[in-house]
Image: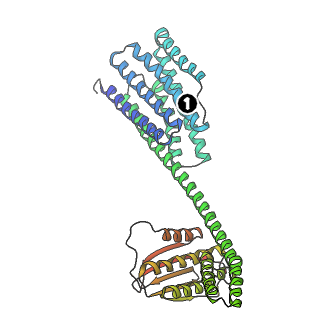
Amino acid sequence: MQPNDPILALLFQTLCTVTLAAVHYGLWRQRRQSFHATWALAWTVYAARLLFISLYLSDRQLIWLFAHQVVTGWAALLLLWAALQFAQRLRWHMRYLWLGLISVAWAWYAVFFMRSMATAGMTSAVLLSGVTLGTGAIFWMRVRRAPSLGARVLAWSFTLWGLHHLDYPLLRALGSDVQLGVFMDVSLIIATAVGTLTLVLGEERAALAQRTAQLEQLTRLLLRAQEEERKRIARELHDEAGQTLTALKIGFDLRGETDASAQVATVLGQIRNLSELLRPQALDDLGLVPALRALTQDIAKRTQIEVTLEADDTAHWPPDVAAALYRVAQEALTNVARHSGAAHAWVQLETDAEGIRLIVEDDGRGAPTDPRPHLGLLGMRERMTLVGGDLKLGPASRGGLRVEAALPAAGEAS
């Protein structure tokens, strides 16, 4: 073994420790959580500890041993503070600085007055071991509170590392078998880095899932509020404005004012069409199939596209499911009328043991070529997702576009 092999091994461990510090610094820059910044500083100081012990092994100057003892205490205090920040979200106070001064005073006393390598080494090892084992205990509590792979890896890493710190003063003299110790330290550094990244990714996934659930809930509430508002406006148009215009038209008819009566009739028809577009009365009064029948007849009348409806009129669905299926059919037929150039469209509503399927096909140009998201398509897909269904697009058997909305049997109400 070459004399410089222990120093080279320690320098390699220093590089690995700096890499771990860089990982925490990057996480702090991204997430702005204070404990990541503290861990970054702690591992940087820990790397300085390794540099000082390397210098001491090189020329045996007590000043390097003193510096090693000082930064060992600082690294231990920073690691403890990072663990407490992570577990309890503690805040920094200036009065904590006296702990760092005690570390300096003890290192000066042990190295320059006691001149006891055993005492200095044991003090450093016990301090680092206690802090590291404490950090492991914090992550074990995290595992019990919120089990995750990242927390489990960190718990094992810090626990084994804490036990390994006792290896130096108890089993080996200073400077002997450094390569073995460095190999174990580097392995634990890698495990700590992997555990940290795994824990952060798990937290990000959990946060994303929570935000997604909140967004779905908000979307569901918005769509429900939208349907309720449409229903209210449609009812007011039909009952208030419609009745007023109807009375006005009757008055014009009785007075023989045919032109004015015709104009009122036109406005009355437009209001009725708008009322049906906002919320078809048949959907609330008669159910889904009569509403689809009225929709297909209206589309055929306004666009001259022949629309065929095949539907089972014996099943009944909850109001939110019926509204979702109706809006999908309405949007799909609107797209057929606007973009497909079709002459014929087919609407099919099927119910079987697997659930419900609404299929809208046409013989037009097929799927749109515009790569940009289509607002109507996004709305259809969102409505089906919120009632537990799915939406698929594909080529129709007759050459156009096929829109299929499927809802499993669990979503069907008999």
| The C terminus: image quadrant | bottom right
Q: Position of residue 65 (x, y in %)?
A: 42, 17
Determine which residue is flagged by label 1: 80
373 left or right of 257 in image: left
User: Do we see residue 395 in this rendering?
Assistant: no
At 42% across and 80% down in the image, what residue appears? Answer: 340
Q: Is residue 47 above or below residue 98?
A: below
Looking at the image, what colour scheme do you see? rainbow
Q: Nearer the viewer, residue 43 or 6?
A: 43
Q: Quadrant of residue 247?
A: bottom right
Q: Amino acid at mark 1?
A: Leu
Q: State whether residue 346 is above or below residue 43.
A: below
Give above or below for 201 relative to 360.
Answer: above
Q: Position of residue 35 (x, y in %)?
A: 53, 36
Residue at x 54%, y 80% (from the top left corner): 357
Indicate whether 91 appears above or below 62. Answer: below
